[in-house]
Image: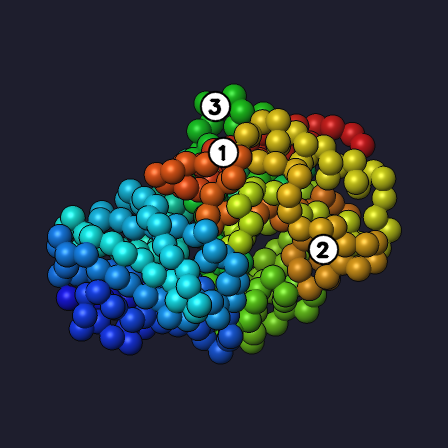
Amino acid sequence: MEINQNFDAGNISVIDCNDASNIQLEINRDNNSEFFQWFYFRLSGVKNQQCTLNITNAKSAAYPLGFENYRVLYSYDRKEWCRHDTDLKADVLSIVFTSRHDSVYFAYFIPYSMERHHDLIANALSYEHCTHETIGKTLDGQDMDLLVFSTGDIKYKKNCWLIARQHPGETMSEWWMEGCIELLVDIENSQTQRVLDKCNVFIIPNMNPDGSRRGHLRTNAAGNNLNREWQIPSLEGSPEVFFVKEKMSVTGVDFLLDVHGDEALPYCFIAGTEGLKGWSKSRQAQLDFYKNRLAEVNTDFQTIRGYPSKAAGQANMTMSTAQIAGLHNCLAMTLEMPFKDTTATPDEKYGWSTLRCKRLGHSCLKVMEEFIGRSF
């Protein structure tokens, strides 16, 4: 019996794996950080043997409510990921599992590897209306990839930005991005044509390559939470934000959607920037239109549950949406998807899945195009 996490985005520490009925594990913390929750590992040598895997520090994780009513992801081929029940008692998350094959993978959510990220970028560049720019390097020396989708005369179109995976463990956000890119490369698609008739679309599919490869939940190589670095980003601590914010200052921003995942809440929802100074009825109307229309277009999305709105003047200006909305006077929103599943539209086998992430990405593009075409 062996447990291994020595691969892209792997994360687990083995305390004891001598007894299959009582395997003891711990999730590793992000580098230079107290954050931990993401795990991803392979269990080998236990075909047809019932195993009990105990993650002993689950209740001490960054978001312990994320493990309540949580169903773990497992896969034999790393393509199809299915859900399996867990049991949370005291500090321990237990997984009782009998593998049908010689090895099985477990993960907190469906992984999105850096290799798949590079494939995503390379495939998009085979289309003439997509261009690529490396806007900088991370602390670990990885590229910060920017894709731009545009057609015709770009000067008279709105500059719409989509960014994802500031928190690397929120891998559903890059699956969402893959769905958006799959639609945007299809230039024969009427919805894509409508988007590109009105918009230049700037995409950062992965804001945090270092944290992604290292198997972090929330931080970059330096241990910094990138979504608290937008007020004064630095090349020493948060170059990822520094380079993106700098590029935004060149292009301007007419629309921003920052894509995330929430560990505890079993809903898809949007958080706005109501806490900005000078929040107006016009800005509220823009936010309401986008959220309400998205709920009409996609049954997985809802507007009832989410984060409470901040009072005017109470916005956290270190966060991407507040900072960019303030600087560029644009609609900027945070999209949240669940690690678990949506309560209103559950899927027993897969839970919140890659396919549903992609479909929500398609819906968000559709509503973005409708939003850009309206006046408020």
Q: Mark 2 belongs to which amino acid?
A: Ala
Upstream in the sequence, badge 3 or badge 2? 3
Quarter occupied by residue 49: bottom left
| Vertical arrangement, residue 314 with respect to residue 177, above or below | below
| C-alpha separation, residue under disc 3 versus residue under disc 2 | 33 Å
Q: What distance separates the C-alpha of mark 2 from that of mark 1?
A: 30 Å
Give me the residue at 61% from left, 72% from top: 234
| Residue sitting nearer the eye, 229 or 77 | 77
The residue at the far bottom in this view is 32
Residue nearest the viewer, comparing 2 with 190: 2
**In terms of image quadrants, where is residue 268?**
top right
- Which quadrant: the C terminus? top right
Work out whether residue 35 can be spotted: yes
Give the Cα separation between the discs numbered 1 and 3. 28 Å
Comparing marks 2 and 1, which lies closer to the viewer? Answer: 1
Counting from the top left corner in percent of width and height, residue 197 is at 60, 27
- The reply, left or right, for residue 44 in relation to residue 260 is left
Q: Which residue is found at the position 67% from the left and 51% from the top?
A: 307
**Vertical position of residue 108 compared to residue 219: above or below:** above
Task: Please give the residue where the numbered disc 3 appears in the rendered image.
Answer: 189
Would residue 300 be found to the left or right of residue 257 on screen? left
Are discs 2 and 1 less than 8 Å apart at CB?
no
Mark 1 or mark 3, which has the lower sequence index?
3
* Residue 99 picture location, percent across and down: 19, 52
Element under label 3? loop
